[in-house]
Each structure stands twice: as structure tokens, then as C-alpha cells.
Image (cartoon, rainbow, N blue to C red):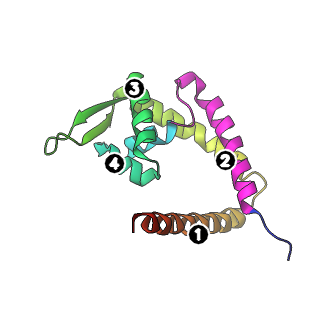
Amino acid sequence: MKDLSFGKYISSIYRNQCIIINDICKDLKISSGQYLFLIKVAENPNITQKELSEMLHFDRANTNRAIKRLESLSYLVVTPDSKDQRNKRNVLTHEGYEVAQLLRKRLKRVTEVLTRGFTDDEKQLFSKLIDTMDTNVQKEVQLLKGGLDG
């Protein structure tokens, strides 16, 4: 069997997907670097920045930058946690919820582009396989982090 290089394809897909997402988000004044945060805050009102970072597998600095951008656009409000002032809670504004709904509709196009020509069975199989790849790489990163800490 020929050597397989899945990373090459995943990297290309990611870069090109970012171009498409940046295009569908440009009128919303957000980019591929912020849209995930907006969607996750919509799904998880009052989520902390730490929880967002863990959920999306981003470091806190990237999360903080994305949150600051969304806040500057008045898409979300950041408030201190009532029990621990060090924690910041994130809630979408009315405009933020409207943008998130619009964005979800637009993101369906990205999925349609990615799976164009796939049968429903192929979509299901691919979803399973890519989920397994994601789980594998996340476990490996956790091992690396554990190795660095130990």
C-alpha cells in the first residue's frame, strides 16, 4: 500500500474552508477565527472563557482575542461570574443571536461543498472516520501535554 498522507489533505481542506468561511462572514465583520466562538456561546449561554477554550481546543489567548472581537461588535457581553470574579461569563446579545442563526444557515453551504458528490451512506461513514481521527489526535495531544508536564 502506498504511503498515505492524510495531513496534507486535512491541511488543504482547512485552509480552503477558512477562505469560504471568511467570504460568507465578511458582511458580519467576523472571520474564520471567531465564528466558532459565536456559535458555541449561542449553544452554551453563560459559558466561561476557560470552558470555551476546552470545548473548542483553543488556547486561552486565542479564545480571549475572539471574545474581545465579538464583544467589540456588540455580539456578546462578558460579565464576571457571580461566585468567582476571576471567571468571565459570555452571553450573546440579541444581535449576536441573530448573527449566530444567520451564520448557521450559511455554514450549511460549507458542509454541502465539502460533501458534494457523497451519498448519504458515504457522509455517515466519513463522519464516523473523521470523528475517530479527531479523537485519536486529541488523545495524542493530551499525552504530549502530560509528557511535557511530568
Classify residue 10 by image quadrant: bottom right
Question: Residue 96 placed where, x, y %?
Answer: 40, 30
Q: Mark 1 points at which residue?
A: 132
Q: What residue type is labelled 2?
A: Tyr
Residue type marked 3: Glu
| Residue occupied by mark 2 | 14
Dot 3 alpha-carbon crowd within 10 angstroms: few under 14, some 14 to 19, many 20 or more: few
Image quarter for residue 109?
Answer: top right
Question: Which mark, by number, is residue 83?
Answer: none
Q: Residues within 10 Å of mark 2 (few under 14, many from 20)?
A: few
User: Which span of residues is magenta-colored?
Assistant: 6-33
Q: Residue furthest left?
A: 83
Q: Distance between the residues labelled 4 and 3?
A: 24 Å
CA–CA distance in space, label 2 to label 1: 17 Å
Name the residue carrying label 3.
Answer: 95
Indicate the secondary structure of the residue bearing disc 4: helix
Mark 1 and mark 4: Cα distance apart in space: 25 Å
Q: Residue beneath label 4, please?
A: 50
Residue shown at the point (75%, 58%) measured from the top left:
118
